[in-house]
Image (cartoon, rainbow, N blue to C red):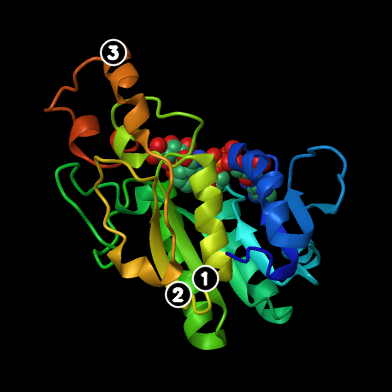
Amino acid sequence: MTVKVHEKLLLTGAAGGLGQALRERLKANCTVLRLSDREDFGPARAREEVVLADLANADAVDGMVKDVEAIVHLGGVSVEGPFMPILQANILGVFNLYEAARKHGVKRVIFASSNHVTGFYRQSETITADHPPRPDGMYGVSKAFGEDISRLYFDRYGIETACIRIGSSFPEPKDRRMLATWLSFDDLHRLITACLTTPVLGHSIVFGMSDNAVTWWDNSRARHIGYVPQDSSDVFRDAVFARTASPDLADPVAIYQGGGFVKAGPFGL
Ligand code: NAI
Ligand code: 15L
């Protein structure tokens, strides 16, 4: 597969867990990788540019987006919590990002959405991208907003977006729930590469998961992306069962796909 189809790519959220995991991997996808976060993460390395910007600052976002062809947007609040930071980073921030993308002619965006857009489906259900959102908190609501605004900018301005509803992307699954939701870093990179290089992306929603035997998500609506996962949580299954207790099947954490997020709160500013 040809993976390098862009001269300059922007990676937001570069100081975060997934940003650090993707920093070297994404250099296969471009000539120059521009990295951004609001936190300082040190100097640029070879074939990199560093632009510090708060997503809530429209002028800073405009400068961050200028001259890039495509964006991998990971930046933002990544867990449930007070609403104001979520509003600033995940709602105002995504508006600023798409406005800047429109002004500067960016053609394609890969948006880090989340499984928490659909966290109130049951762990006994299999859902597709056609199922309506059922967010499990304000964080999930903010990701649903990102999916909707990206659809608007596709319908109105033709900016293609892949909304990747990432499951749980960590070095290993941490608990039994993550046997279903786990996405390895290499598979995340494979999925982003597929989204960046598929000839026609349109506006697509895809669940970000590895080839796990237990799954709640059906990616049949996203075959045009051409993502073929190569890792699986199954190799961790015995170890995860050995170190974790059986779930309480009356607990919402074990009932719903969002796990602990469905009980996080109370909500507040
Ligand atoms: P993280 O919390 O480690 O990284 C997020 C980064 O965004 C941080 O470096 C933070 O400084 C930056 N950020 C936050 N607010 C900002 C603002 N106002 N302006 C500029 N930068 C800001 O999260 P992680 O795990 O790396 O996730 C990356 C993305 O993927 C997030 O959008 C998250 O919601 C999404 N995601 C991650 C999952 C995972 O399993 N790691 C699962 C589902 C979604
Ligand atoms: C997410 O959306 C979070 O960003 C990540 O930290 C995990 O908690 C993940 O979902 C998950 O559901 O495991």
The amino acid at mark 1 is: Thr
- Which numbered disc flags the more N-terminal residue, 1 or 2? 1
Give the residue displayed 35% in from the left and 41% down from the top. 181
SS for tag 2?
A: strand
Seen in the picture, residue 211 relative to 9 is either above or below; the reply is: above
The answer as to whether callout 2 falls within 8 Å of ligand 1 is no
Identify the image quadrant of the N terminus.
bottom right
- Which residue is most to the front? 1
Give the residue displayed 58% in from the left and 66% down from the top. 196
- Which numbered disc flags the more N-terminal residue, 3 or 1? 1
Q: Is residue 86 visible?
A: no
Q: Which residue is mark 1?
A: 161
Q: Are marks 1 and 2 in contact (CB under 8 Å)?
A: yes
The amino acid at mark 3 is: Ala
Please state the horizontal and vertical placement of residue 215, each as a whole percent of the image: 26, 45
Q: Which residue is mark 3?
A: 242
- Measure the C-alpha gap from mark 1 to mark 2: 5 Å
Q: Which residue is mark 2?
A: 203
Q: Nearer the viewer, residue 253 or 230?
A: 230
- Measure the C-alpha gap from mark 3 to mark 1: 40 Å
